[in-house]
Image (cartoon, rainbow, N blue to C red):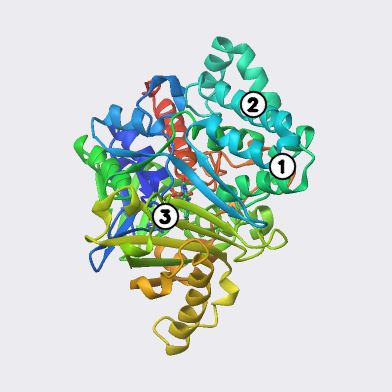
Amino acid sequence: MAYSADIIVVGTGIAGLTAASLLQERGFSTLAFEKNSYPGGSCASFRHQGYTFDTGASVFYGFSEDDKSGTLNLHTRIFNRLGVRVPTIPDPVQIHYHLPNGFEVPVFYEKEKFLGALVRRFPHEAAGIRAFYQELEAVYEILSALPAGSLEDFVHVMQVGVRNPGKTMALAVKTFKSMGKTARKYIKDDELLKFIDIESYSWAVQDAVSTPLVNAGICLADRHHGGINYPVGGAGAIPAALCEGIKKFGGAVEFGCDVEEILLRNGRAEGVRLTTGETFTAKAVISNATVWDTFNRLVKDSRYNVPENKFLRAPSWFQLYLGVDAGVVPEGFHVHHIVVDDWERYNNIGGTVYFSAPSVLDPLVAPEGKHVVHAFVTDEMHRWSGYKRGDRAYKQAKEDFGTLVIRRVEKILPGLSDALEVKVFATPLTHQRYLNRYQGSYGPLLYPGQNILQKPQNRTALKGLYIVGDSTFPGQGVIAVTYSGISCASYIARKLGNPLDYLS
Ligand SMILES: Cc1cc2nc3c(=O)[nH]c(=O)nc-3n(C[C@H](O)[C@H](O)[C@H](O)COP(=O)(O)OP(=O)(O)OC[C@H]3O[C@@H](n4cnc5c(N)ncnc54)[C@H](O)[C@@H]3O)c2cc1C
């Protein structure tokens, strides 16, 4: 049978692009379809009135050039493999937390500086703080020693196990541990435990008890090794470089192509149909849509439907993209901030304000004398589903809610309202429209107490259909979905008889 390509990828989020680029570089032909006119999904940039805004992500791991950061510098390794360059700027602070009761702490790249600041606030917990963060370090040391591959690939799992028996056993044990329960072994102070909660909530949108220790071992330890690095020109530099790599090796990325259906024959995925009616065939199809969108929308056979409550659905977002006069941003202001006004509400919808001003690091993303500000809070579709795009009532509701969030941001940037030059507000409806994500969700989460290995891997109940992205192991975040792309590409490459070499 003459296929349109060896592998078709539905969606060009970071996960789909990662899988396509590695497979294409290995000699497979790939064809990626993206409904938008640009790649990257929630890790992209858009231009508006001279400003470059990051659509979602702007805290990036995985760009270390330093081999001491082990195997976790996945972006560097992938871009080396593809022979494309993404210049980055190191960020000295991962997140600056502004918490109730005047508790403020920046998470510095230098671990001792960060731990020292925590110990000054909680001197009675000095030993517990060190012991807890050392547990994360231990996870990091294991993970950063193991090559990235697919847990569904028997050869990979055996190779890693035989070469690193001690580390593999230790990791297996740690997959059963929760970050919050581990913290409680060492720490008793309620306020400090709340801090540990916001440390996990900052990326996992779950408290620490619900967050696997293994995930925390990457996010909260690598920030002090590989560090946080911002791609010059904005988040969109990452998907742009992946597309460059795909095209360099002969692959195709087609924009403005909305996949309506994943075509099946005898329980096997054999291609896709676009909304235009065109069909394309492949030996394998990779879906970068969420697990709900893949199995309840793109796969039309209802036997494969996934009940919504099979996973805990993360909320969506209300986002503010602001262009502001630079004068409102004080000298020495950090790029990323999290603001919590009340510990009772930090994990309620809208309870925590996330904030980034990447132009503090990279002046290229704002006009001279200006800064970009991206602020966001969790939100739910049901609050917006009664509105229609373009309606006056919708615009007013966005304006009203946006104004409330701006007031909360003024806690860290007094005078922000008067410094606004540009403002764009995005609701869960926007999130759903741009990303095709069910309910505009941040994605499926594990239920409290579930093991990280219960997150779906890349294979599905349908032969020839694979899933990547934040619905799959290990979960949300750009570096996490990059891992899912690597693991999917590794599995497919071996299955199709031309296994990938480990990234080096
Ligand atoms: C507000 C916000 C802030 C964040 N901040 C950070 C951060 O600072 N650091 C971090 O690491 N992570 C952050 N994240 C999380 C991170 O951005 C995501 O976990 C990750 O980018 C998701 O990647 P993905 O490949 O799974 O899918 P997505 O980014 O959702 O991409 C999927 C792509 O597929 C396309 N698509 C879907 N269905 C179809 C179809 N049928 N046909 C064609 N195309 C289709 C979509 O248009 C989209 O481009 C943030 C996320 C958000 C929303």
Question: Which percent across, then down, holds residue 234?
Answer: 31, 50
The answer as to whether callout 1 falls within 8 Å of ligand 1 is no
As rendered, which of 283 and 110 lies closer to the eye? 110
Q: Residue at x 73, y 61 (%)?
A: 344
- Amino acid identity at mark 3: Ser
Spatial CA distance of label 3 from label 1 is: 26 Å
The answer as to whether callout 2 falls within 8 Å of ligand 1 is no
Question: Where does label 2 land, which residue?
Answer: 134
- Amino acid identity at mark 2: Gln
Question: Where does label 1 land, which residue?
Answer: 450
Q: Is residue 433 above or below residue 207?
A: below
Question: Where does label 3 land, which residue?
Answer: 42
Question: Which percent across, then down, holds residue 317?
Answer: 52, 64
Q: Is residue 87 above or below residue 403?
A: above
Question: Which percent across, then down, holds residue 106?
Answer: 52, 44
Spatial CA distance of label 2 from label 3 is: 32 Å
